Amino acid sequence: MFSDAGTISVLIQGTRLHLGVLIALLVVMAAWLLLGKSLVGFQLKVLGQAPRAARYAGFSNHALVWFCLLLGGGLAGAAGLFEVSGPVGQLTSQISPGYGFTAIIVAFLGRLHPLGVMFAGLLLALSYLGGEAAQIDLGLPGAVTGIFQGILLFYLLGCDILIHYRLRPGHRAPALRPAKAEL
């Protein structure tokens, strides 16, 4: 019924491990080299942390934004290709169960570092598998995985707030002022 011409071969028989895993590892290494060892990576870091300094240094804001959008879109398309031709094996209308929202949690959990994102992705993949197992074995609703991921993001952001804005006993918190508008 289905042709094997559109599927990726499995690396280890009896598992769902396919060629996309190796390509993902290569993409992680390429992203680490791009962000950590190249001029474009330096420009992206400066633009993200100090946009006015990047503008003063002559970095092209629009070119860097377009580069990131095109690269991110291409990688998302490649991930979809490997998902459809790998474990799923066919294109269906319900192919994406909210991976975009999960990617936000992966990015925060991985601290925007390519290696950290890889390990955070593995952790959340385990939460998806555990959620499916809990749904099947214990009869829990499918939303348990989403609730766990939401709680994880909430605690991660809460820890960031408490670390960066440490509360001291006896001191009044400074009034929050709106950020200055950039020119």
Image (tube, rainbow, N blue to C red):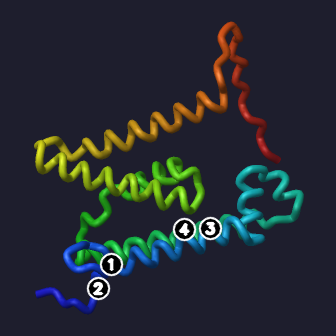
Q: Do the residues labelled 1 and 2 touch (CB within 8 Å)?
A: yes
The residue at 38%/58% (across/down) is 99
Q: How far apart are marks 1 and 4 (CA)?
A: 22 Å
Q: Are marks 2 and 3 in contact (CB under 8 Å)?
A: no
Q: Distance between the residues labelled 2 and 4?
A: 25 Å
Helix, strand, or loop for circle 4? helix
Q: Which of 112 and 97 is in front in this view?
A: 112
Q: Which mark is residue 18?
A: 1
The residue at 23%/77% (across/down) is 90
Residue wearing tag 4: 72
Relative vertical location of residue 168 with respect to residue 142 in this rendering, above or below: above
Q: Distance between the residues labelled 3 and 4?
A: 14 Å
| Residue type, label 2 | Ser
- Of the numbered discs 1 and 4, the one sitting upstream in the chain is 1
Q: Nearer the viewer, mark 1 or mark 4?
A: 1
Q: How far apart are marks 2 and 3 (CA)?
A: 27 Å
Left or right of 95, for residue 25: right
Q: Which of marks 2 and 4 is in front?
A: 2
- Of the numbered discs 1 and 2, the one sitting upstream in the chain is 2
The image quarter containing residue 56 is bottom right
Left or right of 112, for residue 137: left
Residue wearing tag 3: 32
- Of the numbered discs 1 and 3, the one sitting upstream in the chain is 1
Q: How far apart are marks 1 and 3 (CA)?
A: 23 Å
- Of the numbered discs 2 and 3, the one sitting upstream in the chain is 2
Q: Nearer the viewer, mark 3 or mark 4?
A: 3
